[in-house]
Image (cartoon, grey):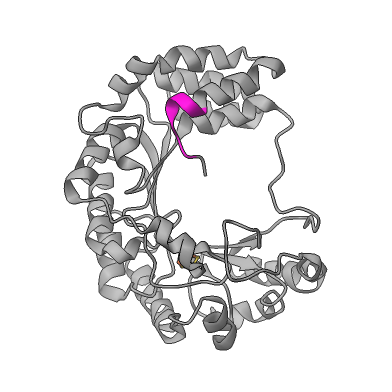
C-alpha cells in the first residue's frame, strides 16, 4: 500500500479528523511525517529593517553560538529517518555556518529525507557553495528579498546589504540550474508600503533567471525591528494594479506567484482555523531546533531516537486521542501537547 498516496487523497478529502487518522497510520507504520526546521547558527550578516536582527537587543538575545558537528550528527540520527522535509534556515542566516549547513544537507541525503530546503539572503552563496549544496542533495533554495531596486534593497536589508552580491547570486543560480534543472528556486518577498510598487519591475530584474515560485507576503510584526510601518493600506491597493498583473506575466514564464487574495489591513496574523483540531496537526509534525533550544529540547537527541522519545511520552496514544478530540477538549490538548512535546511551531 502506498501510504503517501493515501495521505494525499486524505488531504484532498480534507477534514482534520481524517488528517489526524492518516498521521496516526504513518506513526504506527513508522513512516516519515516530520517537518524538521533547523537553524544551525543564530546569526545573520544582514540587518533587514523588518527583521528582529535590525534591533540590537533582539540580536543580543539570539547570540548563542552554533550547533557543533556532533550535535548535528545526533539530531540526524534521532530524527532524519522519520523526516519528510528538512528546512535549514528558519529564523537566522544558515550560511553564517557553511560547514554546518553542508553537513545537514549531506546527512539529509544520507538518511533519505525526500525534500531538503534552505532559506538564505544568498549574499554568501557564490557558485561554488551553491553547486556544492545542490550536489550534496539540496532540493530548494528560498531567497529572502525585500527590494527590487538597488536603493530599496540596500535600504530595506540594512547597512551591510550588498546588491552586487545579490546580482552575482542570480548569475550563479542560472549556472546551477543549467546543471541541475530540477533544483527549485523560490523568492520570498515581504511587501510593505515602501517596496510594493517596484514589484512591477520584478520580471526585469529576474529576466532569464529560472525562478520557480515567487511568494509575496504582507509585512507583519515579528519581534522588535527598525521598520515600523505596518499599515497595509497601500499594499492592499497594489493588489489589482501591480500584483495580479505581475502574477499573470510570471505565469507565462512558468513562475508560480503565491499571494493572498485579500489583504487584511486591520490585522497582521494569519487566518485562524475554524476547526480547532487543525491546530493539533503541527504539534505532531513540526520540530524546530536551534543552538539555543538543543540542550533543553524535550527530545534527548544524544540518547534517544524519535521512537524512544515517542514511547517515553506516549505520543502514539496522544495522537490517537486527538482524532476524537472535541472542540472543548482541543484547547486543553493543545496546551498539554505544546508543553510536553516542547516543539516550537512555525
Ligand atoms: S536575511 Fe533574513 S534573518 Fe537576516 S536580517 Fe534579513 S530577514 Fe533577518
Coordinates of residue 63 in the picture (x, y in percent): 36, 59
Asked if residue 134 is among those painted magenta in the image, a careful observer would answer: no
Asked if residue 341 is among those painted magenta in the image, a careful observer would answer: yes
Coordinates of residue 123 in the picture (x, y in percent): 38, 75
Position of residue 177 relative to residue 297, above or below, is below
Position of residue 230 relative to residue 29, above or below, is below
Q: Is residue 49 left or right of residue 168?
A: right
Residue at 43% x, 77% y: name it: 170
Residue at 59% x, 26% y: name it: 10
Q: Nearer the viewer, residue 325 or 241?
A: 325
Q: Quadrant of the N terminus?
A: top left
Coordinates of residue 128 in the picture (x, y in percent): 25, 73
Coordinates of residue 204 in the picture (x, y in percent): 59, 83
Q: Is residue 54 left or right of residue 86?
A: right
Residue at 40% x, 38% y: name it: 84
Position of residue 99 relative to residue 285, above or below, is below
Decide if residue 113 is in sight here.
no
In the image, the segment drawn in magenta is 338-344
Asked where in the image residue 215 lies, by quadrant, the reply is: bottom right
The count of marks equals 0
Asked where in the image residue 74 lies, by quadrant, the reply is: top left
Q: Is residue 62 left or right of residue 192?
A: left
Q: Residue furthest left?
A: 70
Residue at 23% x, 45% y: name it: 72
Decide if residue 340 is in sight here.
yes
Q: Residue furthest front?
A: 57
Q: Nearer the viewer, residue 37 or 11?
A: 37
Amino acid at each position: 500500500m502506498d501510504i503517501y498516496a493515501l495521505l494525499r487523497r486524505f488531504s484532498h478529502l480534507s477534514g482534520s479528523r481524517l488528517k489526524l487518522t492518516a498521521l496516526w497510520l504513518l506513526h504506527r507504520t513508522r513512516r516519515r511525517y516530520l517537518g524538521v526546521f533547523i537553524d544551525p547558527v543564530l546569526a545573520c550578516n544582514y540587518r533587514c529593517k523588518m527583521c528582529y536582527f535590525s534591533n540590537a537587543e533582539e540580536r543580543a538575545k539570539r547570540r548563542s553560538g552554533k550547533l557543533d558537528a556532533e550535535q548535528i550528527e545526533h539530531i540526524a540520527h534521532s530524527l532524519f529517518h522519520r523526516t519528510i522535509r528538512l528546512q535549514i534556515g528558519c529564523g537566522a542566516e544558515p550560511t553564517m555556518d557553511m560547514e554546518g549547513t553542508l553537513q545537514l544537507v549531506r546527512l539529509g541525503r544520507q538518511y533519505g529525507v525526500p525534500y531538503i530546503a534552505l532559506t538564505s539572503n544568498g549574499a554568501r552563496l557564490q557558485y561554488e557553495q551553491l553547486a556544492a549544496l545542490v550536489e550534496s542533495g539540496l532540493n530548494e533554495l528560498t531567497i529572502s528579498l525585500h527590494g527590487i531596486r538597488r536603493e530599496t534593497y540596500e535600504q530595506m536589508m540594512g547597512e551591510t546589504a550588498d546588491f552586487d552580491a545579490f546580482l552575482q547570486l542570480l548569475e550563479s543560480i542560472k549556472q546551477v540550474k543549467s546543471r541541475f534543472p530540477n533544483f527549485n528556486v523560490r523568492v520570498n518577498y515581504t511587501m510593505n508600503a515602501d517596496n510594493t510598487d517596484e514589484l512591477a519591475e520584478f520580471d526585469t530584474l529576474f529576466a532569464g533567471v529560472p525562478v520557480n515560485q515567487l511568494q509575496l507576503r504582507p509585512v507583519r510584526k515579528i519581534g522588535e525591528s527598525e521598520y515600523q510601518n505596518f499599515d497595509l493600506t497601500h499594499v492592499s491597493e497594489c493588489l489589482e494594479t501591480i500584483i495580479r498583473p505581475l502574477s499573470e506575466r510570471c505565469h507565462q514564464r512558468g513562475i508560480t506567484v503565491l499571494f493572498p487574495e485579500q489583504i487584511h489591513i486591520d490585522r497582521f496574523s494569519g487566518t485562524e482555523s475554524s476547526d480547532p483540531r487543525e491546530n493539533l496537526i503541527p504539534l505532531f509534525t513540526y520540530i524546530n531546533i536551534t543552538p539555543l533550544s538543543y540542550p533543553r529540547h524535550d527530545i534527548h537527541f544524544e540518547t534517544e531516537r524519535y521512537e524512544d522519545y515517542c514511547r517515553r511520552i506516549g505520543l502514539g496514544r496522544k495522537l490517537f486521542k486527538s482524532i476524537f478530540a472535541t472542540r472543548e477538549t482541543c484547547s486543553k490538548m493543545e496546551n498539554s501537547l505544546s508543553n510536553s512535546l516542547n516543539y516550537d511551531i512555525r
